[in-house]
Image: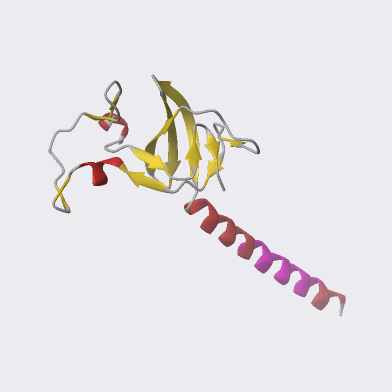
Amino acid sequence: MRKIICMMLIFFSCSSLHKNQAIRSLNESDSYFVTKIDSIKNYYLIYANRNDSLFKIVSKKEKCMRDCNMIKEQMSYKFSLISYRENAFKINGINTIPVGVQGFGVDEDTFIDLEGEKGIFDIHFATNVIGLCFKK
């Protein structure tokens, strides 16, 4: 009888472990892992990985709000990203992406380079980021 109870406990604990790992994998797959934070002029550059892709997220430097969840390197966040490339080159609602783009001007004084050698061919803005504050 003890053997049966022990085997049932092991079975349920293993199935629970696999279920928790599956939930964690699902949560991590839609999160971005911040690897580096840099800046250029009036903008922060947040480098983040998700799955096998590297993202360069641009955020205008602003004062942080109260109750701010400061973005830090080596942490994961669920950014809501908007592609600059996909939204910058529309003519009559049609996306016209030029070939050989080296970067984007985000304002009259700031040009942000793409880093094709690192696999970055676009820049993104996050709707849930102000400065380096992450809004849940």
Q: Residue at x 43, y 40 (%)?
A: 49
Q: Please state the horizontal and vertical placement of residue 35, each as a whole percent of the image.
A: 48, 32
* Prevailing SS of the magenta stretch: helix
Above-or-below relation of 98 to 3? above
Q: Residue at x 72, y 66 (%)?
A: 13
Residue at far right of view: 2
* Front position in the image: 64 or 29: 64
Residue 29 within the segment the image draws in magenta:
no
Q: Please state the horizontal and vertical placement of residue 52, each as a whole percent of the image.
A: 39, 45
* Front position in the image: 72 or 108: 108
Screen quadrant of the N terminus:
bottom right
Quarter residue 38 falls in: top left
Q: Please state the horizontal and vertical placement of residue 32, each as a whole percent of the image.
A: 48, 44
Total labels drawn: 0
Q: Please state the horizontal and vertical placement of residue 54, each as a whole percent of the image.
A: 38, 39
Q: Magenta stretch?
A: 6-18
Q: Taking 95 as reference, is 22 left or right? A: right
